[in-house]
Amino acid sequence: MPPTLASLVHHSALKLTVRAGEDRLDVPVRWAHVSELADPVPYMEGGELLLITALKLDAEDPEAMQRYVKRLAGAGVVGLGFAVGVNYDDVPEALVAAARQEGLPLLEVPRRTPFLAISKAVSAAIAADQYRAVTAGFAAQRELTRRTLADGPEGLLVALAAQVDGWAALYDASGAVVATAPEWAGRRAARLTADVQRLRERPAPASSVVGGAGNTEHPENADRVELHSLGTSRRPRSALAVGTAAALGTAERYAVHSAIALLTLTTERSRSLHEAGLRIDAAVLRMLLAGEPDHARTVAGDLYGGLLDAPFRMIVAESPAARTRAATAAAQNAAGDAAPETGGDPLGTLGALVEVVESAAARAGEAVLVVPDGERLVVLATDGGAAVAACVEHASALEAARPASESLAGGDEESLVVGLSAPSGPIAASAAYKQAQQALSVARRRGRVCVEHEHVAAGSVLPLLADDAVRAFADGLLRALRDHDATGRGDLVASVRAWLSRHGQWDAAAADLGVHRHTLRYRMRRVEEILGRSLDDPDVRMELWLALKATAPD
């Protein structure tokens, strides 16, 4: 405990006498300061015991003393020590009355007690309190380290809660509660999910204080809660919450800082293991795509449970921002420059998709294989499982939230594009990957967030023509025919459309146009002459039909 006025009064060597403020002696003393200024307030910080002899004060003037004491109390001075036998033989009654009126403790300092002795006593008490705090902090650090090595983060939280006489909670990157101590703190910790998510948006290291008495944002929780980000990257990977009834003392602060350091080390170690797991994931995926499922199973062992034996879906996702980052990184690597700091989530929207898929799989107890592949993300998930459903739901939510006028081609550069394969097995993993790529391409062309290959195969090919390159080809192919029609010398474009739609049947096509079949034959010969190509060629007929469809009004 820091020194208080009461501890100074009970100090046998100082012989101090209380003349006013007997009920306020338990106030901590930050320092003892000597000043004979008529107004020392500008030089006070609050928490001081002010020592005076009234050298420049009229201590017997009641009005002057009321003004003097009132200013001292307003500045946060916790006590006034008056030396008798120097300028006054006794403490003036005017000063005593003013101190009682303001409730400011007034101590009588005997002639034989120098102010220096009081300053030394305060300094020694502060140093002893700091030494106790440091010693307690080191002891707490040893205990936290021991519990971490023995029981992991859960054991650390138990020890930390005991050290601060409160509770502690650990959160993952999404703001979900991972562990709490004691167990009853789980409900309190869950209320802070939104605060943890806001903390995650700030560059690490970051901290904030929420709750506490009088806090309007969390009136249901009177605890004072400190939130601290964990991890060494700019984007925090987890967070620690410490709830107490009051502000932390020095020893408790040492314990919290030790816990942050230990949890950061644990997080970074987990990160290294995670990166090693990613390398295994990538190797397993390469073997599957190379048509070697047996080798993939051997390497995977029990990592993915029955994922490689049951029907699965292949998911391929990308975003324009990821392509830009990948291209920038490649250019800088080629130039020998260091890559810029992209934070803890270098994949941007792809990183959010990873969190969604992995969290859903973890809750459902499913195995999932997630492989960042350059500018893309490849996911292998159980068909009909929670991970696939979460992916589709996430994509649907993004598409629903996007303005109708916005397209992936020219809209938000963080837009996500996802392609899903049909259900497949390990032996056909390569085909599933191609299906997912095809679905991804269709999603990009259609301006959709997510497309499943099954829907592409069951739908029409015409939506695939909604592409600027296809339209440019169609316009070029039909331009000469349209220019001819513009002169009023015949309706060649309409004639080609009618003839192709009737599969080359002259009479039926001529009837649709309301002309004689010989007129239609003449027009088709003109088409061949203008295009320089024969309509007997099925490729020519196919190209003309697709060109007509691609340029047809919606």
Image (cartoon, grey):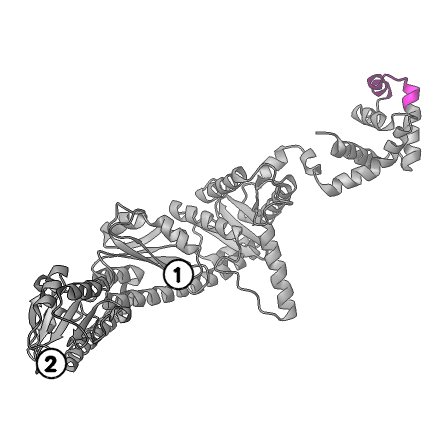
The answer to if 516 sits in the magenta stretch is yes
Depth check, front residue: 495 or 327: 327
Mark 1 / mark 2, whichever is N-terminal: 2
Q: Could you classify mark 1 by the number of other residues whose Cα lies within 10 Å: few (under 14), some (14-19), or many (20 or more)?
A: some
The disc at residue 86 is 2
* The one of 18 and 520 positioned closer to us in this rendering: 18
Image: 319 above or below 7: above
Q: In the visual, does 174 lie left or right of 147? A: right
Mark 1 and 2 residues: CB-CB less than 8 Å, in contact? no
Q: Residues within 10 Å of mark 2 (few under 14, many from 20)?
A: few
**In the displayed structure, would residue 211 be above or below residue 10?**
above
Quadrant where the N terminus is found in the figure: bottom left
Q: Position of residue 58 (x, y in %)?
A: 15, 71
Residue found at x 52% / y 53%:
348
Res. 349 in view: yes
Magenta region: 506-520
Give how far apart the Cα atoms at labels 1 and 2 are: 54 Å
Position of 499 with respect to 451 (left or right) is: right
- Tag on residue 206? 1
What is the three-letter code of the residue carrying label 2? Val
Tag 1: amino acid: Ala
In this picture, residue 363 sits left or right of residue 319: left
Please identify, in this view, whether the residue under mark 1 or under mark 2 is nearer the observer. Answer: 2
Picture quadrant where residue 70 is located:
bottom left
Q: Is residue 291 visible?
A: no
Residue at (85, 25) in percent of width and height: 495
